[in-house]
């Protein structure tokens, strides 16, 4: 099985605008267009996409709408939830600063912490293995925090190690498994399509 894990293109929030809908910026749309150079010639057996608009926009720009692949939009791979602070990054950062726990442990009211996302990512990975075949090529269009957690699970690393790496907008992580789910090869956070 080959997994292509792709972070969405630059959104308004990524650019520092945390008000209103979190859609792609003009730069984000350009990034998604460049992403298509890496993805368009690949044949995906199935595509999983976050149901948040920035991921959907990235998928649509990079692959278009005339795909033969089955597309599943799911909140299972949405970004971590900031709960009551979802549309107020300033308030979330204030609450986070006041929190005295370790990295990723803060859970806003009605939100998630790193361990909640780890459980959700683990359940999603089990679904991927259960619902797909060994030889399938799968695209997962999601978000930076979620994908870092998912990668840590796949690579069998402690989830808190995501503090030490970032995934840039439209980066592609590829992970190849054999039939026993042993990793044959992985390439973390490739952005070569942005320079071409």
Image (cartoon, grey):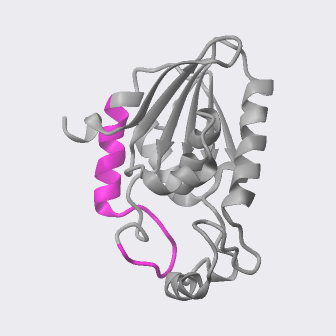
Residue 143 visible in the snapshot: no
Q: Is residue 5 above or below residue 75?
A: above
Q: Give the quarter of the figure containing the C terminus.
A: top left
Residue in front for this viewpoint, 67 or 10: 10
Q: Is residue 95 above or below residue 134?
A: below
Residue in front for this viewpoint, 180 or 91: 180
Q: Quadrant of residue 128?
A: top right
Q: Quadrant of residue 133?
A: top right
Residue 115 among those drawn in magenta: no
Count the labels in the image: 0
- Residue at 47% over, 47% down: 7
Left/right placement of residue 123 relative to residue 151 reads right
| Span colored in magenta | 16-37
Q: Position of residue 28 (x, y in %)?
A: 34, 56
Q: Position of residue 98 (x, y in %)?
A: 58, 88
Q: Quadrant of residue 131?
A: top right
Q: Give the quarter of the figure containing the N terminus.
A: top right
Q: Position of residue 104 (x, y in %)?
A: 61, 66
Residue 24 among those drawn in magenta: yes
Residue in front for this viewpoint, 101 or 75: 101
Q: Is residue 169 above or below residue 72?
A: below
Residue 179 visible in the snapshot: yes
Left/right placement of residue 6 relative to residue 15 reads right
Residue at the extreme left: 196
- Residue at 31% over, 39% down: 191
């Amino acid at each position: 099985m080959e997994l292509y894990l792709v972070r969405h293109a630059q959104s308004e929030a990524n650019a520092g605008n945390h008000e209103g809908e979190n859609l792609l910026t003009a730069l984000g749309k350009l990034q998604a267009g460049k992403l298509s150079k890496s993805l368009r010639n690949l044949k995906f057996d199935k595509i999983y996409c976050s149901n948040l608009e920035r991921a959907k926009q990235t998928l649509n720009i990079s692959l278009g709408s005339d795909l033969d692949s089955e597309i599943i939009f799911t909140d299972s791979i949405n970004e971590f939830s900031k709960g009551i602070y979802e549309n107020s990054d300033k308030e979330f950062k204030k609450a986070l600063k006041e929190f005295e726990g370790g990295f990723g442990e803060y859970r806003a009211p009605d939100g998630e912490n790193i361990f909640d996302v780890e459980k959700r990512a683990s359940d999603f990975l089990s679904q991927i293995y259960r619902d797909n075949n060994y030889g399938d090529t799968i695209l997962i269009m999601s978000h930076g925090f979620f994908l870092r957690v998912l990668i840590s699970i796949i690579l069998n690393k402690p989830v808190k190690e995501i503090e030490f790496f970032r995934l840039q907008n439209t980066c592609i992580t590829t992970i190849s498994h054999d039939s026993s789910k042993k990793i044959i090869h992985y390439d973390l956070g490739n952005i070569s399509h942005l320079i071409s």
